[in-house]
Amino acid sequence: MTKTNYMMTVDDVAEELGVSKQKGYRIIRQLNKELEDAGYMTVQAKVPRTYWCERFYSGKRNVG
């Protein structure tokens, strides 16, 4: 049984974008701020995979 993690870590972000962990943390902080501003709860140093895909692959700019 294959399990897909709901949350992306800094390692996932850095690998996906080919950037350093430091840049990955900055990106996660920015995405989590957007989610918080829209009223969602966040987890430090992780970002929901669905929101990641929305922001990086579908071009949508709005959270909710």
Image (cartoon, rainbow, N blue to C red):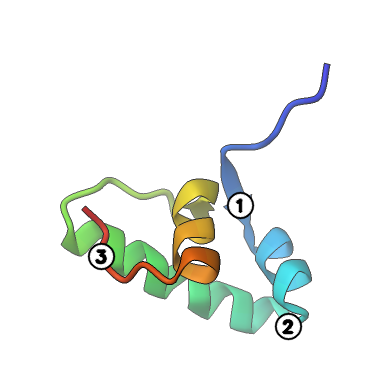
What residue is shown with label 3?
A: 62
Q: Indicate the quadrant where residue 12 lies.
A: bottom right
Q: Furthest residue to the top?
A: 1
Give the foreground label among 2 and 3: 3
CA–CA distance between discs 1 and 3? 20 Å
Q: In this view, does 37 lie above or below 4?
A: below
**In which quadrant is the N terminus drawn?**
top right
Residue located beneath label 2 in the image: 20
* Residue to which mark 1 is pinned: 8
Residue 36, horizontal then vertical, whole percent: 24, 58
Q: Which of marks 1 and 3 is nearer the N terminus?
A: 1
The kind of secondary structure element at disc 2 is: loop
From the viewer's perspective, is 30 left or right of 8?
A: left
Image: 12 above or below 17: above
* Location of residue 19 (image quadrant): bottom right
35 displayed left or right of 48: left
- Across and down, in percent, residue 54 comes to 45, 59
**From this viewpoint, is residue 43 visible?**
yes
Mark 3 Cα shell of 10 Å, populated few (<14), some (14-19), many (≥20): few
Residue 5 place in picture, x, y as percent: 65, 37
Sequence-first disc among 1 and 2:
1
Residue at x-position 64% and y-position 82%: 22
Residue at 24%, 48% (x, y): give it: 40
Amino acid under disc 3:
Asn
Amino acid identity at mark 2: Ser
* Mark toward the viewer: 1 or 3: 3
SS at badge 1: strand
Q: Is residue 45 visible?
A: no
- Structural distance between the alpha carbons of marks 1 and 2: 15 Å
Residue 18 falls in which quadrant of the image?
bottom right
Q: Which residue is drawn at 28% across and 45% down?
A: 41
